[in-house]
Image (cartoon, helix red, strand yellow):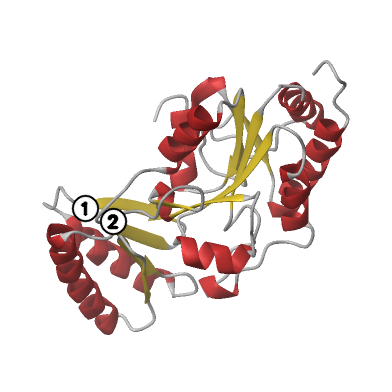
Amino acid sequence: MTGLRDRAAATPAGELTDALRRFAALPRVLVAVDFDGTLAPLVDDPMTARALPGALELLDQLATLPDTLVAVVSGRDLATLRQLTGAVDPVLLVGSHGVETSYREPAPSRDEAESARFAILEAELTALVRAHPLARLERKPHSLVLHTRGIPPEEAAATLAEGRALARGRPNLRVTPGKDVLELATRHVGKGSALLDLADARGVDQVLYVGDDVTDEQAFEALGHAHLTVRVGPGETVAQHRVRDERHVVTLLRGLLTLRSGRGPSA
């Protein structure tokens, strides 16, 4: 990636507020946020993740404003994302890193060739988890995910290294590392590509995207400086701005709601 910065401190409040004010004044916008580590604190058991109080309600309120599209974007499969957010129209959902969405026809099911690749990969990862019983394997429609959060560091490192080794020499697999996870996908779109496609289809002037992990960095890079990007937490980033944690994401959304609600008639 180009333009990486490893600034641990959050963006000065006035600088981010100015950027949000300019964004809020645009005629038509897309507000998109990741789920885990952005709306919801990271937890050992992914199915116990919950958005911070008020976060989803703020998204609902933003989505009711004129010319304001709102999307939750995640590596979670669409069914799980819908379950964890409880989101209904007009809030849009982008799951499985863009492979599944709530606003278009369901993604095609695995064809024979993909099904064969998936079955082989599933058998190998199942054996890997059997050898590392503290690890967990998550199954999605087009990918399998190794989870090692909460596992002793040496065991986690060994598990993830073996997972990466399984993917070597397989050009049809997309390997995506994350925070204590490794995803191996037999089909991949990417959060950034999904957001750009959605923005183009709906005719928005700019996208605001907020996220915290490796796949979010890929989205920040895809969106570039034509859009507004915010990193949550520490680590190298290509995002234009940074907030400290999920609580500050809620504050950001609340501020954006106020700014967007207060647009004048000429905005």
Query: Residue 230's x, y, as percent?
Result: 62, 36
Query: Residue 214's x, y, as percent?
Result: 45, 46
Query: Residue 139's x, y, as percent?
Result: 35, 70
Residue topped by disc 2? 185
Q: Is residue 126 visible?
A: yes
Q: Which mark is residue 173?
A: 1
Kind of residue indicated by mark 2: Ala
Question: 133 or 139: which is nearer to us?
Answer: 139
Question: 171 or 153: which is nearer to us?
Answer: 171
Q: In the rendered view, would you say 61 is above or below 25?
A: below
Q: Which mark is residue 113?
A: none
Instruction: Tell me whether circle 2 and circle 1 mark residues in contact (CB < 8 Å).
Output: yes
Residue at x 20%, y 65% (from the top left corner): 118
Q: Is residue 229 visible?
A: no
Residue at x 74%, y 21% (from the top left corner): 22
Q: Quick one: label 1, few (<14), some, or many (20+) residues within 10 Å?
A: many
Q: Quick one: label 2, few (<14), some, or many (20+) residues within 10 Å?
A: many
| Secondary-structure class at tag 2 | strand
Q: In the rendered view, would you say 52 is above or below 7?
A: below
Q: Earlier in the sequence, mark 2 or mark 1?
A: 1
| Secondary-structure class at tag 1 | loop
Please give left or right for residue 266 compared with residue 194 in the image.
right
Q: Quadrant of the C terminus?
A: top right
Residue at x 68%, y 62% (from the top left corner): 51
Q: CA distance from mark 2 to mark 1?
A: 6 Å
Q: Quadrant of the N terminus?
A: top left
Query: Residue 40's x, y, as percent?
Result: 64, 60
Please give left or right for residue 74 compared with residue 100 in the image.
right
Kind of residue indicated by mark 1: Leu
